[in-house]
Image (tube, rainbow, N blue to C red):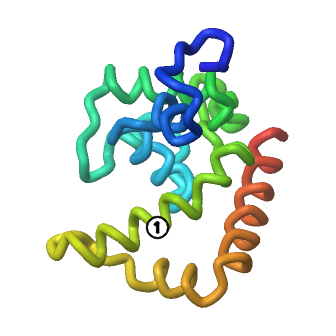
């Protein structure tokens, strides 16, 4: 989903970002990629939100087209595909953390994820650096 084949409703950065990320399923796939380290199609399907197979396939394809995730053949089993977050995906950590904080504050029945919120609030830059470093190592291992 590049700028050339996507029609934007406006040139507003919020609107443009929502054209790419503006549905529940896309953000949940990104959440799972980054925070729960889900890598296989079945991993995403097993999320508590129970995404339908056709919707998951569509979102993974769009995220790959948007260069938000990369798709690799599993070196241990060539029939399987591994999905990995890109740097562009990792740049979504702060807004997703803010959504998590907002949900924990205003939606009482939500799972608070206290330790994630605390780590982020203590030192957002260090939190981001740790996530980036661990995911880079994982990406490199999967490329081999």
- Split into 4 quadrants, where in the image is the N terminus? top right
Apparent side of residue 97 relative to residue 67 in the rendered image (left or right)? left
Q: Which of the two residues, 85 or 6, is positioned nearer the viewer here?
A: 6
Q: Quadrant of residue 104?
A: bottom left
Residue at image point 25% right, 52% down: 48
Q: Total of numbered circles in the picture?
A: 1
Residue at image point 68% right, 31% down: 67
Residue at image point 66% right, 53% down: 90
- Return the residue found at the far top: 5
Q: Which residue is mark 1?
A: 98
- Return the residue found at the far left: 109
> Helix, strand, or loop for circle 1?
helix
Apparent side of residue 109 relative to residue 30 in the rendered image (left or right)? left
Q: Which of the two residues, 6 or 104, is positioned nearer the viewer here?
A: 6
Residue at image point 67% right, 53% down: 91
Residue 32: image location, x then y, percent: 46, 52
Apparent side of residue 103 relative to residue 107 in the rendered image (left or right)? right
Q: Quadrant of residue 17?
A: top right
- Split into 4 quadrants, where in the image is the C terminus? top right
Residue 118: image location, x then y, percent: 49, 87
């Amino acid at each position: 989903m590049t700028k050339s084949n996507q029609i934007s409703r406006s040139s507003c950065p919020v609107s443009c970002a929502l054209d790419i990320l503006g549905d529940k399923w896309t953000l949940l796939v990104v959440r799972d990629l980054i925070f729960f380290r889900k890598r296989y199609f079945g991993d995403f399907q097993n999320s508590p939100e129970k995404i339908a197979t056709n919707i998951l396939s569509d979102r993974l394809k769009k995220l790959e087209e948007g260069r938000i995730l990369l798709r690799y053949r599993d070196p241990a089993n060539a029939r399987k595909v591994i999905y990995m977050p890109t740097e562009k995906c990792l740049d979504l950590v702060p807004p997703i953390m803010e959504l998590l904080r907002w949900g924990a504050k205003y939606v009482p029945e939500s799972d608070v994820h206290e330790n994630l919120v605390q780590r982020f609030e203590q030192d957002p830059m260090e939190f981001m650096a740790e996530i980036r470093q661990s995911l880079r190592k994982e990406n490199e291992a999967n490329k081999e």
